[in-house]
Structure formats: C-alpha cells, structure tokens
Amino acid sequence: MTAATTRDEAMRGARRPRRDWKGWQFAGPFGVVFLVVFIAPLAYALYLSLFQNRLIGGNSFVGLDNYAAVLADGQFWDGFLRVLLFLLIQVPIMLVLALAAALAIDSARLYASGLFRMVIFLPYAVPAVVAVLIWGFMYGSNFGLAADINDLIGSDAVRPFSASWILASIGNIVTWEFVGYNMLIFYSALKTIPVDLYEAAEIDGARGWQVIRAIKIPAVRGAIVIATIFSIIGSFQLFNEPNVLKPLANNVITSYFTPNMYAYNLSFAGQQYNYAATVAIVMGLITAVIAYVVQLRGTRKEDR
Amino acid sequence: MTTALRTVNPQARPRFSVAKPRKSVALTVVMLIFLVYALVPLAWLIINATKEQADLFSSFGLWFGDRFALWDNIVATLAYRDGIFVRWLGNTLLYVIVGAGGATLLATLAGYGLAKYAFPGRRSYFAVVLGAVAVPGTALAVPTFLLFSQMGLTNTPWSIIIPSLISPFGLYLIWVYTIDSVPTELLEAARLDGASEMRTFFTISIRLLAPGIVTVALFSIVATWNNYFLPLIMLSDPAWYPLTVGLNQWSSQASGVAAEPIYNLVITGSLLTIVPIVAIFLFLQRFWQSGLSAGSVKQ
C-alpha cells in the first residue's frame, strides 16, 4: 500500500512538465503580436505623454506638464464625472437584472427556460452600431416609438435626446446590449454548483430564498466580481453609443461627453496627439486602479 | 440518507425534488418582460425593413406599412452606390476570417502552452497578458493609430486585422479548458511514441479542446464583426470600411448640409448585418455554452 503510494507520487513527479523552452513554440506567436499591438502602443503613449509639439520649437520634452494639464482640465473632469455617474447607476441595475434572470432560469421553474436563455442573450450578438441605430430610430421624433408614446399621452414628456434624458437613454442601450451576456456568465457559474449541495440544503429544510442566499449567491461571487470589473472597464471606455447618437443629439452630446470621446476628438479633430495620449493614460490608470480595488474587495469577501 | 427519509414517510415528501421543481406560471410571466425587452428592438428592425421610406414616417413603428417592400429594400441596399454594401460585407468577412481565425489560433496555442509547459518566463508572461485586460482597449487606439501610420499600415486591411489577433480572454479560456480536459498522461504517452510537441497538439489535444476553441472563435467573430472604433480611426477610404462604419456613414448622411436621408437602406442594411452573426450563434449554441461553463469553473 505504502509502496504503491510512493511509486504513484514518483510517477506524478515525473509527469510534471519539465522546465525547458519547448512551451515557447506555443506561446511565442501570441507573444510577438501582443508586443506589437499592446506593449509597443503603451510604451509609445507613455513617450508621447512626456512631450509637446509646438508650432515654434517643435517637439520638446516637457516632463509631467501634460499630466498636470489633464488633471486641471475641466472638460476632462466633466466627461469623467459623467461616466462615473453612468457607471454608478447603470452597472448595478444591469448586473442585478442579469443575476435575477440567471437565478430564474437556473431555478428550473420556468416554462421554456432554454428559449429565455437564448433570446435574452441575443442582443449581445448585435453590433453596438446597429443597436444604437435601432434605438436611435425608436427614440427619435420622426418615426420613433417615443413620438407614438407622446401622441398617446398628448404631451412631449418623453424626450430621449434632451440633456436630462440622454444618459438614461444611453444606459438603456448599454443594458440592452449586455444584460444577456452577464446573465449567461452568472448562469454558467450557477450550473457548476454540485447537486449534492442542493440536496443537503433540502434535507436541512432550506427553501427558496434561503438556498439562493446561502448557496447560489456565494457560488457566483467570483463571477459577479469579474462581471463588475468588465462593466467598469466598459463604462469608462464609453464611446460607441454616444458617438453614434451624436448626430441625433448634437447639442447635448459634446465632443468631451466621455473621456474616450475627448481623446478621440483631441487627436482626430484637433491633432493634439500628445495631449490625447495623456488623457488616455490617465483614464487607463484610473480604470486599472478601480478594477484592482474591486478585485481585492471581491476576493476578500470570498475568503470570509 | 434520502432513501431512509423516503421509506419513513413517502407521503410527506413533496412530489417535486431539487432537480425538478414545479414550474411556475408567475415566474414565467415576469420573465416574459425580459423577453419582450430583448425582442422589441429586433422586431422593430424586421418590421421597418419592410417599409418604404415614406411609410416609415406615416405608419406606426411596430406594425407593417401600406406596402411590403422588404425585397425592394434589400435590392436597393445591395445596389446603392455601385454595390458598396456588398464590398463592405466582403471586407467584414475578410476581417472576421483572418482576424478572428488568427486570434483563435494564437490564443489556443498560447493558452495550451501556458497550461502544459513550464517554460522560462511563464509566470510573467501570464501576469502581463491578464493585466492587459484591465488596460482600456480604446486607450491604446490613438497610439496604435500613430504607430501604424508611421509604418504605413493605416488605411489598409492590416490595420484592422493585426490588432484583432490578440484575445487575452480567449487565452484565459483555453488555459482553463486545457487544465480541465487535456490529461498530461496522454501527452506523455504521445511523447514516448516519439511524436513532436506540435504534432501531439494538432492530432490529440486539439480534439479535446474543441468546445473551448469554438467558444473562443465565436466571441472573436462577434468582436471583429462588431468592431467599430478601430476601423473608424484606422480607415479613411470607404472602400475598406466594414459594415459597422459604413452603416453609420449612411446614417449620418441624413443630417448636415447636403442631407440625403436613406433611412430605409440604413434599416435594411442593419438587418442584413445582424442576420449572419445571429445565425452563427443560434447554430453553434451547444458548443459555446458548454465552453463557457468550463471557463466559469475556475473563477
């Protein structure tokens, strides 16, 4: 018995992959392209952010001047606070809806649950541009549903493109696009809960909400942390939706509506590449720090 | 334990079990709201793709117009400006096949290599690639554009394809999937038979990884098919546009100085753009759903 165990251990030791360079033939190609499309632009952005290109004097090293300028830039903070507000409201709503849908589908108490799972996920496959075009038409006063609703209630209360509505209008589009994707992530995590756990809970007399609170929510905590991080990154990068809606709500959606639109317009309308790179780096740093904090908090809760 | 309970008092146990609870009409009805929310915009798109431009303005949004003009709209969309829509469709297919195909291959090889080989630099490789997920992709867009323009790559298909080749999420998924489903014993056996590492991968491992690979391929296809920001900044020649950028250009034609609205073509073009991608998802759902569940095990 003991002899067999030691031999087994020795075998396992031999099976552990040897430390040699063979793995690079698999990891190499990805690594090379990764250097070209991730590391090189990142390094270039850092380089750009430390220089300024003036009409007189040309390209010159300015240290952290660009960073100081961004941090004192009202337009940058205007966009930043807007995406922060968006993130604080839209992300919780979307994730709670996604979790509720996942729990409902996982409960096995739905008729045709496979249909629900598929259809709710479907909008994820629709390109953001097309999603925004459709919702833009539906929001519109020409032949949109907003116009029909206003006709019905006899006022013009529903104005999706007005300054007070626009963020909610964008939030609705983003929720529509991604609620099903997040639902599927949560659902996949719920599916990994072993059936014995449910049976044990049933024997202990746990029912409905108790099972959800004691078993299901803890089981998907990791998935919730991941989904939250991805949603935060997505919100801070907000670009497609406001940029495609811009022609419809031109006075409301400014060129610095979100930090990303600001960086885009700085470089492609203003040719201010150095400043745009600085905006992008500052935004990237803020995003990375917040994502890191969320992950830290999320995993700490998991340990408890 | 369960059997014991059952024999003590079979009547007291409810007829449904944990695995098969009673269906709930109320819950189904509540969930129908979700279903309607997901479907209304798609229904709107399909219904309005059947209308002439005049009908769009005069008829109710969620019902059909006076004339069923779907075929006319499709023909007009495909023929507009010497068939530029067909050209955009071809571009999109090119970006998807080369970009998403390449992304799937690279992510599969690298995820597999990271899972099965202890090569020097593995830990930092993994950490850097996963850390890259937190870097906003769009933050890199401007510097990537400047780099590519110095290399003369902007306004060519390469400027879209090369950045599409990297999928850190795909690498992660294959890494998890390899650990779960490719036994090291099998690789050892192949090694003893004298097979090279690459040959072992392409003859044995790739079959075991199939659901994971399909999942990565699908999400890469969606990402490249739906790509908007990158082509928007990289391309200035409409002949290289993918569908997304082209459609948005058609849409913005409706406003401005020389406004020439073609709402019916924008709507029909949108419908034609989403049909293939939705079809792929529906047909392959069995594969990618099992691939996704494997990915969530290790979270």
Image (cartoon, coloured by chain):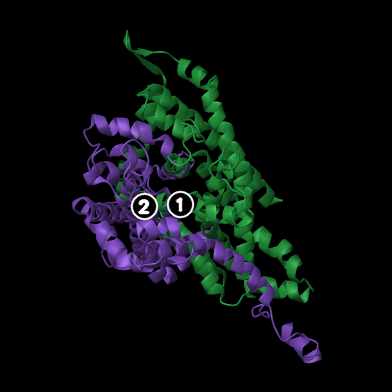
Q: Is residue B151 above or below residue A13?
A: above
Q: Nearer the viewer, residue B86 or B79?
A: B79
> Which chain is painted in green?
A
Q: Is residue A60 above or below residue A290?
A: above
Q: Quadrant of the N terminus of chain A?
A: bottom right
Residue B270 visible from this viewpoint:
no
Say whether marks 1 and 2 touch (CB < 8 Å): yes
* Percent position of residue B229, x then y: 38, 42
Total marks in image: 2
Residue shown at 40% from the left, 42% from the top: B121
Residue shown at 51% from the left, 58% from the top: A181
Q: Check residue A137 in the rendering and tell me which mark sits there, or answer none.
A: 1
The residue tagged 2 is: B263
Residue furthest to the top in view is A57
Left or right: A38 as drawn, with respect to A238: left
Secondary element under disc 1, as helix, strand or loop, is: helix
Q: Tell me the crowding category of disc 1: few under 14, some 14 to 19, or many 20 or more residues within 10 angstroms, Cα based.
A: many
* Percent position of residue B104, x then y: 34, 56
Amino acid type, mark 2: Tyr
Q: Check residue A247 in the rendering and tell me which mark sits there, or answer none.
A: none
Residue furthest to the left in view is B82
> Which chain is painted in purple?
B
Residue shown at 72% from the left, 51% from the top: A304
Q: Chain of mark 2?
A: B
Amino acid type, mark 1: Phe
Residue shown at 70% from the left, 83% from the top: B16
Residue B242 visible from this viewpoint:
yes
Q: Nearer the viewer, residue A224 or A277?
A: A277
Q: Is residue A259 above or below residue A152?
A: above
* Percent position of residue B194, x then y: 25, 64
